[in-house]
Amino acid sequence: MASDKQTPPIDNSMSDRNLHEELPDLDDLDLDDLADDIEFEAEQSDVSNVSLLKSIPVDITVEVARKTLILDELLNLKAGSVVMLEKHEGDPVDIKINGTAFGTGEIVSKNGQYGVRLLSIIKKPSK
């Protein structure tokens, strides 16, 4: 059964040549003004982006110490086993933000809850 709908004719009136003729001449563009507009828009968006960034959650990790065990030692661990660490009580702990070194601190206890007091913050490396 043939369809009663007819396919509309194709409009070939605009050729590739006509498309190129309608494009603006790049020599007529004032690129300095365009660059100023882009910088201004970037400055305005930076302010709103900062507000957006402030609401992004980040993970803070307080790392007391690390220790490497051989597989045999790991397999012999059981409830009650003690793994001795290289750090001593009172030594600074490492603080990481999303896995990146942020600073050092000391473990504190307040009302039966652990916390960390910041001792130092790593300065951003100079470029």
Image: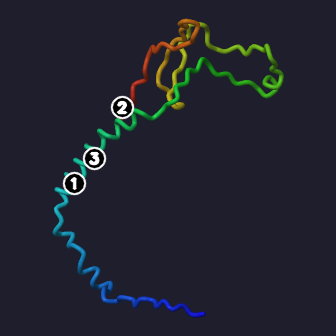
Q: Is residue 21 left or right of residue 88?
A: left
- At numbered mark 2, what does the secondary structure look like: helix, strand or loop? loop
Residue 35, which numbered label? Answer: 1
Distance of mark 3 from mark 1, alpha carbons? 11 Å
- At numbered mark 3, what does the secondary structure look like: helix, strand or loop? helix
Residue 126, which numbered label? Answer: 2
Answer with the quarter of the image where residue 16 lies: bottom left
User: What is the x, y in percent for residue 124?
Assistant: 39, 29
User: What is the x, y in percent for residue 73?
Assistant: 80, 22
Total residue callouts: 3
Answer with the quarter of the image where residue 21 lies: bottom left
Above or below: residue 104 compared with residue 53: above
Distance of mark 1 from mark 2, alpha carbons? 28 Å
Residue at 21% x, 52% y is: 37
Above or below: residue 6 compared with residue 48: below
User: Colour scheme used in the picture?
Assistant: rainbow
- At numbered mark 1, what does the secondary structure look like: helix, strand or loop? helix
User: What is the x, y in percent for residue 2?
Assistant: 57, 93
Q: Residues within 10 Å of mark 2 (few under 14, many from 20)?
A: few
Residue 85, which numbered label? Answer: none
Residue at 18% x, 69% y is: 27
Depth check, mark 3 against mark 2: the one in front is: 3
* Residue named by callout 3: 42
Q: Earlier in the sequence, mark 3 or mark 1?
A: 1
Residue at 53% x, 13% y is: 115
Q: Are marks 3 and 1 in contact (CB under 8 Å)?
A: no
Residue type for callout 3 = Ala
Distance of mark 3 from mark 2, alpha carbons? 24 Å
Q: Are marks 1 and 2 in contact (CB under 8 Å)?
A: no
Depth check, mark 1 against mark 2: the one in front is: 1
